Image (cartoon, rainbow, N blue to C red):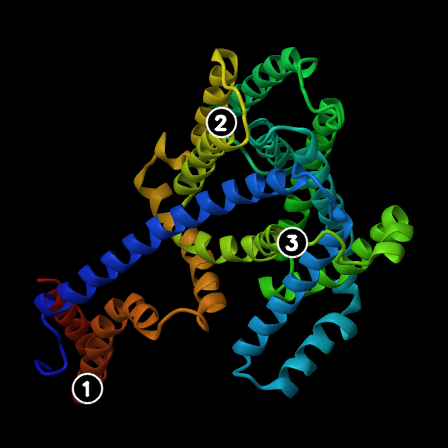
Amino acid sequence: MAAGIRSPVAEEKPSRSQAEVHRRLKYTSLAVLVVQNASLILSIRYVRTLPGDRFFTTSAVVMAELLKLLTCVIIILLQKRLNVKETVYFLVDAVVFQYQDTLKLAVPSLIYTLQNNLQYVAISNLPAATFQVTYQLKILTTALFSVTMLRKTLSRVQWMSLLLLFVGVAVVQVDQEGKKEAAADSSQNYTVGLIAVVVSCLSSGFAGVYFEKILKGGAASVWTRNVQLGIFGAALGALGLWWRDGDAVAERGFLFGYTGAVWCVIFNQAFGGLLVAVVVKYADNILKGFATSFSIVVSTVVSVYLLGFHVDLLFTVGAGLVIGAVYMYSLPKAAASSSAPSSSSSSASLASPRAEGDAEMEAFLPKSVLSSGRRGVSFSRRPCHRLTAQSTRGGGGGGGGAAAERLCLKTLTT
């Protein structure tokens, strides 16, 4: 038995190294979230305000959906160990034969396509910092739809944070309303941009909650769902392109106005969401809230130095309220009132999503990371089961086996 049991000292090094890896991944996730949130808004604003020929935003939406669809198919192919035949059969079964499941994603796909187009309209008519602050209204809409559609409950702190969020956005809009008439660029319409961002927040909240409801109601993976979304998104985006810019695209071409900066925007929009979906595995709600708040600061600072944005006291107060509200909303509800029974039940409920996430990402994580997370449970139980079985066979009764297991567990914990 001594040979089969590892000493606690031998296990300290793997646990410490695992904690170090997790800490690095956590802060890497923070950096990725901040960069993706801030860079997408700033890059879209930059390419939409450059002089010269402008690209068709509808074509950029379609291109981003096609790239996202291709990426998800490649990920599924990697999960199937590069077996093309098995991947094709899997996708045909998931998309065609289970068509009723696929059709459920037509609604969120339509809304996401509308949202992506509205983002281009909003950012083209609003300063990047103003859009970044106002776009946080999606937290409010998502919370309201979650309460009504998913029957979720919010804490008092979260309700208070939503009120602060609304007040902060309103303060920013009052500040920008005074500057609207002084805008030098007559090609930008502040009212159109504001309407676009509000409708985008409404659509984002509804589509996100609806998509979450579908994910909880089925066994399909996130990548399979994104393939289904990508098929509808590309088709609906192409329909919108034909309806809005069909004649111009036929005359000038699908890739008209595409530059290196435009391609960066498209790649960021296509891969940014998938990248965030991966790194969020290592980021808790507090970290995500901090990343969103920090990205507002980054967008504001960059807008001041590179895009000529002017910050005054009223904007600072409004943005500060929004940043504080985002952080407050991300605080865990259990932090306010925690008890022993509730903490044990919450840890059990959190274990299930984590297990699903581990199975989801197993193909992309190093084997050392995956095995180290399971090592503590497997080594401590296996010798006890072996000892219990031997004692049961030798003693001829269940009492000896139970006593042997208690003795073994006591030895391991001391």
The amino acid type found where label 3 is placed reads Thr
Q: Secondary structure at mark 3?
A: loop
Residue 339 can be seen in this image: yes
Instruction: Specify few, some or many for label 3: CA neighbours under 10 Å numbering under 14, 14-19, or 20 or more.
Output: few
Counting from the top left corner in percent of width and height, residue 387 is at 18, 81
Which is nearer the eye, 132 or 80? Answer: 132
Q: Nearer the viewer, mark 2 or mark 1?
A: 2
Q: Is residue 398 above or below residue 19?
A: below
Q: Is residue 177 above or below residue 46?
A: above
Q: Secondary structure at mark 2?
A: helix
Report whether 135 appears left or right of 369.
Answer: right
Residue 12, by quadrant, is: bottom left
Quadrant into which the C terminus falls: bottom left
The disc label shown at residue 259, or none: 3
Which residue is under mark 2? 304
Q: Is residue 208 above or below residue 215?
A: above
Mark earlier in primary sequence (1, 3): 3
Question: Spatial distance from mark 1 to mark 3, Cα to Cα?
Answer: 72 Å
Task: Tell me whether circle 1 and circle 3 mark residues in contact (CB < 8 Å).
Answer: no
Mark earlier in primary sequence (2, 3): 3
The disc label shown at residue 390, or none: 1
Name of the residue lying farthest toward the front: 52
Report whether 166 appears left or right of 350.
Answer: right
Counting from the top left corner in percent of width and height, residue 189 is at 75, 25
Q: Nearer the viewer, mark 1 or mark 3?
A: 3
